[in-house]
Image (spheres, helix red, strand yellow):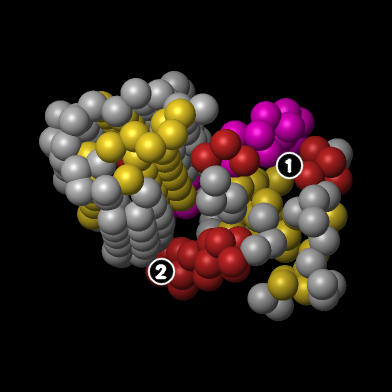
Amino acid sequence: MTQLFFSDYEDEVSLAPRPLALVGAGGLGREIAVLVTQINEAHGPTWDLRGFYDDRAPATPTVGGLPYLGTVADLQAVASPLAVAVAVGSSASRAAVVARLTSPQLSFPALVHPQVALRPAQRIALGEGCIIQRGCLLTCDITLGRFVLLNLGCTLGHDSVLEDFCSLMPHANVGGAAHLAAGVYLGTNATVIHQVRVGAQTTVGAGAVVVRDLPAGCTAVGVPAKPISKV
């Protein structure tokens, strides 16, 4: 996992707004568009939001007031530098989209709501493409891999690790020193208690509480969470 401390991302802010496009023209995409607006309002004109790319064309030529720009293949073919945020909620689907975006013209900044406290003293490491929404609380010594999504109001305890493409839906909670392997998906209000490990590509259902390690590739629900299926 290639990571930068959040202070390194702050150092990248330039005087001129950088062009930015979103992949995913659904509900999450519109929410991330609002996040970009909030970043610009708090920090000045950081991003010039161009519009949406999506393989499924929307019913109208604009989405939330922004134009539909084409498919993922069209994005891959852009001729000039462009920052990209992948607004796809599913861990597996987000990873599949990113795998297609190999053009050297594309970059994937971390987008963090301006009210989320990430200071150098917290020692928070973020991979490229992370998205952290409003109301999230991260304590200290936390590692996020590439393209991790923290939706509204999530909490992460000390020394927790979330590997690449993890997805936390609103108000999910991860305890201190917990470890989520690549592609883990936590449903709304799901909780992983301290020092528990969740295997790669596992889905934890909404409201479930994980109190023991879970294997890779399963779906777990309930309190305490128990696997009900395995891929």
Per the rendered image, the range of residues in magenta is 94-112
Q: Name the residue under label 1.
A: 81
> Relative to 2, does residue 29 appear above or below in the rendering?
below
Q: How far apart are the alpha carbons under marks 2 and 1?
A: 24 Å
Task: Answer few, some or many: residues within 10 Å of disc 1's Cα (few below 14, many 20 plus, some between 14 and 19).
Answer: some
Q: In this view, does 115 lie above or below 142?
A: below
Q: Decide which of tag 2 and tag 1 comes sooner along the chain.
A: 2
Q: Look at mark 2 in the image and give the residue it sits on.
A: 42
Q: Which of 223 and 193 is in front in this view?
A: 223
Q: Is residue 102 magenta?
A: yes
Label 1 sits on what residue type?
Answer: Pro
Q: Which residue is drawn at 70% across and 77% down?
A: 65
The disc labelled 2 sits on which kind of residue?
Ala
What residue occupies the far front of the structure in this picture? 228
Quadrant position of residue 206: bottom left
Is residue 100 among what the camera can see? yes
Give coordinates of residue 80: x percent, y percent: 80, 42
Residue 18 screen position, x and y as percent:
63, 53
**Dot label at residue 3:** none
Q: Is residue 206 magenta?
A: no
Label 2 residue SS? helix
